[in-house]
Amino acid sequence: MLTVLAPSGPTRGVALVLHGGKSHSFEPVQARHLSPARMVPFARHLHAAGRKHGLAVWILRNSVRGWNGEDMTPLKDARWALARIRAEHPGVPIYLLGHSMGGLTAICAADEPNVDAVVALAPWLDDVTPASAVTGRKVLIVHGNEDRWTSPSASLRFARRAAPGAAELRYVSLRGAGHFMFRRVRLWHRLATGFLMKAFMERTGVPGAGSSAPAAALDRVIPPSGEALPLVL
């Protein structure tokens, strides 16, 4: 299921928001489940920053709750949603924002046409997650150092593997933050929105987009030298 937050004018880019889930489950996803509900504020924060500049935000609710091994059901759902985006808005750049299992989905779906940048929040990565999918893409990975559900160290190892091929790769470790992003939630929002808005502005050159506060503030949170891995905030 897709929910579309439309821009104020013509669509110049689309962000797809991807939620978390479970390792194995074929239970249908409901709006009341915490995983999709957790990403709604992120989608709204990004939409508030980007709508006047032409950025649409699409929120995907997966068909089922699990990754389900080789089925990789959320990845199939994401590729379906990306095909819908390209059909409705051919040629526009696409931005992926995912949490936990949705972060893994975003990383794996980054090889789709027109994807420009990816933000993965507390992603569920391991040492066999393919780094080739983010080749030529801008990538931000944010992980709390107190996460007990997904592995910050595995995310950092992935970032180091992927950095040589990515157009840009930043890894941010948030001190005192856990998996569900309750602590330091404003910083999670600022990082995700700022990174994607900056990528969107650089790609599209939208007139007036330079005034976007989240994008302008990003370099104050992550200095331009933030390519070093990891940056601890």
Image (tube, grey):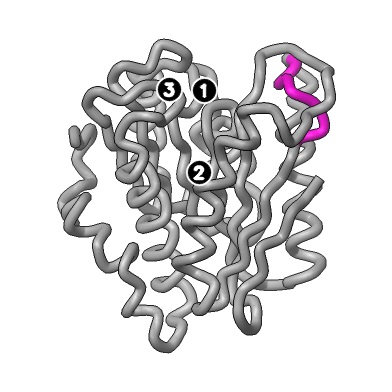
The x, y position of residue 213, in whole percent, is 31, 69
Residue position marked by numbered label 2 in the rendering: 134
Say if 181 sits above or below 163 in the image. above
> Label 2, label 3: how many angstroms apart (C-alpha)?
23 Å
Of tags 3 and 1, which is closer to the observer? 3
Of tags 2 and 1, which is closer to the observer? 1
State the SS at label 1: loop
Kind of residue sitting beneath label 2: Val
Q: Main secondary structure of the magenta part?
A: loop
State the SS at label 3: loop
Residue position marked by numbered label 1 in the rendering: 124
The magenta region covers 62-68
Decide which of tag 2 and tag 1 comes sooner along the chain: 1
> Label 3, label 1: how many angstroms apart (C-alpha)?
10 Å
> Label 2, label 1: how many angstroms apart (C-alpha)?
15 Å
Q: Is residue 164 visible?
A: no
State the SS at label 2: helix
| 94 relative to 230 in the view: left or right | right
Decide which of tag 3 and tag 1 comes sooner along the chain: 1
Q: Is residue 64 magenta?
A: yes
Identify the mark at residue 179; answer none if there is no mark.
Answer: 3
Specify the quadrant that holds the N terminus: top right
The x, y position of residue 61, in whole percent, is 74, 40
